[in-house]
Amino acid sequence: DAKTTQPPSMDCAEGRAANLPCNHSTISGNEYVYWYRQIHSQGPQYIIHGLKNNETNEMASLIITEDRKSSTLILPHATLRDTAVYYCIAGRNTDKLIFGTGTRLQVFP
Amino acid sequence: SAVISQKPSRDICQRGTSLTIQCQVDSQVTMMFWYRQQPGQSLTLIATANQGSEATYESGFVIDKFPISRPNLTFSTLTVSNMSPEDSSIYLCSVGGTILAGAFNEQFFGPGTRLTVL
């Protein structure tokens, strides 16, 4: 079973920040938090990952709580092209990743 | 990063037949995985493809139905055997672990193979 829980859907206005929450209360100490997204049934696209510290890259920011039991993916200025299913996964790069049901983000004009 | 290609990209097959899907990576990787995504569903892991040994299957998936080969560190195949309409899905491979030319911490996914069984 997936180790993460996410809301099934969210809406966001174009140009606004999209904040996608994820709960991973049973995450192990050596497991990362990974975020992927999938657009139109293409292969999942890697977004960002983190272990303990907050992370930022050109696509998004990842905020991980101090107890590591939850995290938030932030898309700072959502565009229509960010409409996708977003998956939060707890795991290691050398191990299998178990996908949950994800959050379907709809960005509207 | 790793660039992954899959062949075929899509196919329509008759029930009772078999289809072999290929996954090619542009660099050597330690881990390769096969996933299935049924219509409207999330990804489900089928198996871990182990180089030089038998694949490790997840609960609900068996070797007779989904034989997997991994002859080297850049290539793997998944065969969907004796197909039925319930096998209609997108099949994806992913890679992870250490690329021998450098390390990375994420897994990368191929574009998927869309299979329709009539």
Image (cartoon, grey):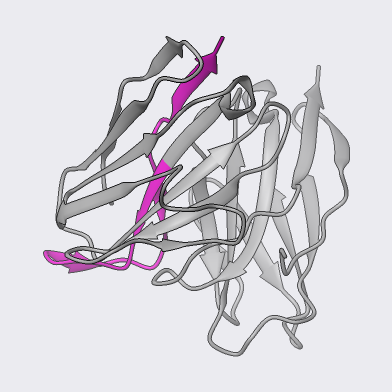
Residue A77 shows in this picture: no
Vertical order, B75 against A107 (above or below): below
Front residue of this view, candidates A58 and B71: B71
Q: Is residue B112 left or right of residue B5?
A: right
Could you tell whether B77 is left or right of B115 in the image? left
- Residue at the spot x=76%, y=88% of the render? A67
The quadrant holding residue B21 is top left
Which region shows up in magenta?
A: B93-118
Residue A61: x and y in percent read 62, 58
Residue A58: percent from left, percent from top: 48, 48
The quarter of the displayed image where residue B117 is located:
top right
Q: Is residue A89 left or right of residue B54?
A: right
Q: Is residue A84 above or below residue B32?
A: above
Q: Going 31% across and 20% down the picture, which residue do you hit? A: B8
Q: Is B48 inside the magenta-drawn segment? A: no
Q: Residue at x 16, y 65 (%)?
A: B52
Instruction: Give the residue at x 78% y 79%.
Output: A69
